[in-house]
Image (tube, grey):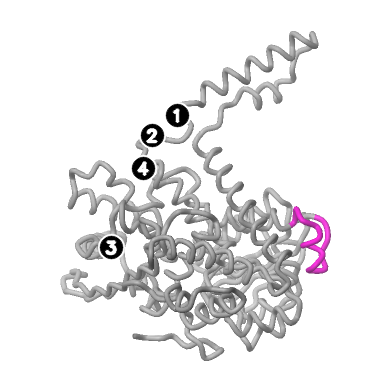
Amino acid sequence: MSEQQGHDGLSFRQSVDHMVDHAISLMDLKDGMGDALKACHSVLQVSFPVEIDGKAEMFTGWRAVHSDHRLPSKGGIRYAPQVDQDEVEALAALMTYKCAIVDVPFGGSKGGLEIDPRKYTQQQIEAITRRFARELINKGYLSPAKNVPAPDMGTGPKEMGWMTDTYRQLFPNDINYMGSVTGKPVEHGGVRGRNEATGRGVQYALREFFRHQDEVERTGMTGSLKDKAIIVQGLGNVGYHAAHFLQKEDQARIIAIIERDGAVVNPEGLDVAAVHNHIAVQGGVRGYPGGTFEAEGERILELDCDILIPAALEGVIHTDNAPNIKARLIAEAANGPVTFEADRILRERGVEIIPDAYCNAGGVIVSYFEWIRNLAHVRFGRLDKRFHEARGQHIVTAIEMATDTEVPEWVRNELCRGADEFDLVRSGLDDTMRLAFQDIMEKRRTHPEINDYRMAAYVIAIQKIARSYQDIGY
């Protein structure tokens, strides 16, 4: 098994296991339960040829199931040149804990294909994706009942749509075929709000944090998200949506954006949408006219700011740069951006971290909603939207009759508008993120041996999973 070693000498999998071990050490678990919780139940490796430009090219992919204590097991599939089995197993474990933390009844799984998708045409990616999907389906690692993939780094709605269609072709009589994959295009069984869900979840996590001023004061900050200086590392799907919503809806200042080719900095605030468009055209942030370009992007992680949002790869904050991080709060939009040793350094320095296992759970939360929608075969809001519109109209009429005044148009419109699917998905995501953070906060407050959000989140997850294992006789 290949193990990518980070700055701290630990693989991603080892770093995750160390964090889990720390949480287990704070708990009273049945002998052997800790080892059972950490073990990855199964891993599939497949290698297959696809004809590219007239010749066969070999591709290797993995699908790991960390836990199937709840079915189906759930987790994204990433396309990246550095994917290996170690990374996929670590991400599958994180998915198990993540689902438990936010009360989504799935087991944890993850997949990856060792490929640089930028080097292939759309037609080639489709052929590769469909073949990969067939390999997973034939081995029982893709189905609406057992294992449900979703997008991750390097994949999106198109790839999920191709996988769903491949499953449908192999199982034409399965009426629940749409539930075999989530993150699909809306026109092909996807749910509105899924594409932005992980970034939106990061925003909701930060909003909930700032609702609790005693928690905010731990960081030395006060007030709301308004005008807070934020650095975002990685402006992919997650980083872009988190930064965009925080800027547009919460009036936060995005003072730096770090990408592959460097970073762009503007203390007065960057136009996130404009930077995103520039990257789409130019392939990076170099040359963006609205800020100063810094070629050594990693150094910008150490820039003074209120909030740092690492939203790209794992292990970007390590023992080399953790002592120099000046952010008061880190919101882990990526999986595993802070290594185990760096986490210890940051805690000792008083830097608060909203952990990945909670912070970036928005994707799986809305994937859960999409899966439910696919199995129910009806979109959210279809049965009761007009009912609530009519009830709103009755309320407006009653107010006008009782006061003998006309209700303002904007009030009438709001009261008489029934919630559509997008409204309900966003509401469900917001509620789930709020309740999960409140549980984490309460666990930390009531257990003196737990002094950070990450351990509080892991303890919550492990307690839920251990209880499930004990109940079913594992």
Circle 2/circle 1 CB separation < 8 Å: yes
Up the image or down, 432 lies above or below 22; here it is above
Circle 3/circle 1 CB separation < 8 Å: no
**Is residue 256 shown to the viewer in this render?**
no
Mark 2 highlights which residue?
A: 378
Residue that protrudes farthest toward the bottom in the picture: 9
Q: Point out the tag, 4 or 1, that comes first from the N-terminus.
A: 4
Q: Point out the tag, 3 or 1, that comes first from the N-terminus.
A: 3
Query: Residue at horizontal 54%, vertical 68%?
Result: 334
Query: Residue at horizontal 34%, vertical 75%?
Result: 114
- The image shows residue 356 at horizontal and vertical percentages of 57, 67
- The image shows residue 214 at horizontal and vertical percentages of 81, 60
Q: Which mark is residue 134?
A: none
Magenta stretch: includes residue 213: yes
Instruction: Tell me the SS state at disc 4.
Output: helix
Q: Amino acid at mark 3?
A: Tyr
Instruction: Tell me the SS state at disc 3.
Output: loop
Instruction: Tell me the SS state at disc 1.
Output: loop
Left or right of residue 37: residue 304:
right
Mark 4 highlights which residue?
A: 374
Q: Residues within 10 Å of mark 3 (few under 14, many from 20)?
A: many
Mark 3 highlights which residue?
A: 141
